[in-house]
Image (tube, rainbow, N blue to C red):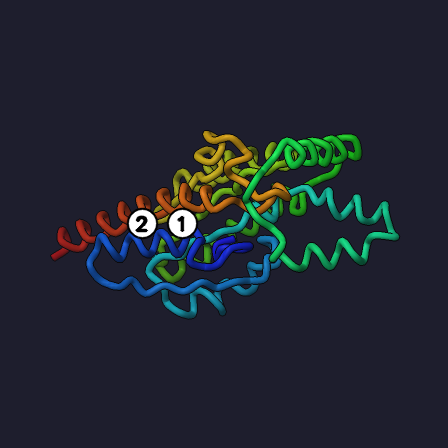
Amino acid sequence: MINGTPFAYADSFFAKAIERLNQESGGPIRSEVVSLGGFPAPRAVKHFKKRVLSGKPDIVVLQFGSGDAAVPIQKKIDSLSSSSRKARSSIREDTSHINDDRITWRHVLKWEIKSLVGLLLRMPPVTSQEKYLEAIRQIIAEAKETNTTLIVLSPFVFGSRLSALYAKRYTAALREEIAHEHDIHLLDAYTELSKFPRATMLCHEGFHISRRAHDVVARQLADLITTIRTRKAAAARDIN
């Protein structure tokens, strides 16, 4: 979702954060989005050094977690309804139908039903917490080898309360994991987005965050990057 999916890139939290930073700094900030096709964190690890660190970035914003903490309830429902599997699969691959307009009680009811299905079937998330943290640890180690500042985003909110429960747990585990790391920063989007009604923070399928949610995360990200750059500038002055 760092590239704005299902909206245009200009609507993404990353684009909006960079726009604000450019306005405040008075100069262009060179940025690039490296999309790994929605891979969960363990699959993305092998691409991190080659596709991200090879560009020698000063700061890397890492947005995994939402795809990892999510419980794939819709896939399970589709597998139980083989006659509609092909049609629903094609819908999932095309995000053009996803929107954040007119979230109604019907959408919220669907989120609750899916959550109940997940609970009854005792479904796990896409990536276990152990494997997720293992992948994050490896990425942190590779970033430290190149003295790259790393911002790790927590999972976002979900329509499904079951997925949201995992997101909350993963966020707490990330906070503990990163607490004593130098130049590694947690951006806790989950807690911030949880301050608002779910219907205002999500698209109707309950997974992608809304434009308003992108605005919320953009403010968080811009503030954190500003703090990091200020500290780096002060440290450089002290050395000189």
Decide which of 4, 53 is in the foreground and name it: 4
Q: CA distance from mark 1 to mark 2?
A: 9 Å
Crowdedness near tag 2: few (<14), some (14–19) or many (≥20) residues, C-alpha within 10 Å: some
Residue drawn at x 57%, y 44% as measured from the top left: 203
- Residue 116 left/right relative to 35: right
Decide which of 122, 128 is in the foreground and name it: 122
* Residue matched to label 1: 151
Decide which of 6, 58 is in the foreground and name it: 6
* Residue matched to label 2: 225
Residue at disc 2, secondary structure: helix
Q: Quadrant of the C terminus?
A: bottom left
Q: Residue type at mark 2?
A: Ile
Q: Quadrant of residue 73?
A: top right
Label ID, residue 182: none
Q: How many marks?
A: 2
Residue 62 drawn at (x, y percent):
46, 53
Crowdedness near tag 1: few (<14), some (14–19) or many (≥20) residues, C-alpha within 10 Å: many
Looking at the image, do the residues carrying marks 1 and 2 touch, with CB atoms under 8 Å apart?
yes
Residue drawn at x 48%, y 65% as measured from the top left: 49
Considering every residue shown, the one lying at the far left of the view is 240
Q: Residue type at mark 1?
A: Ile
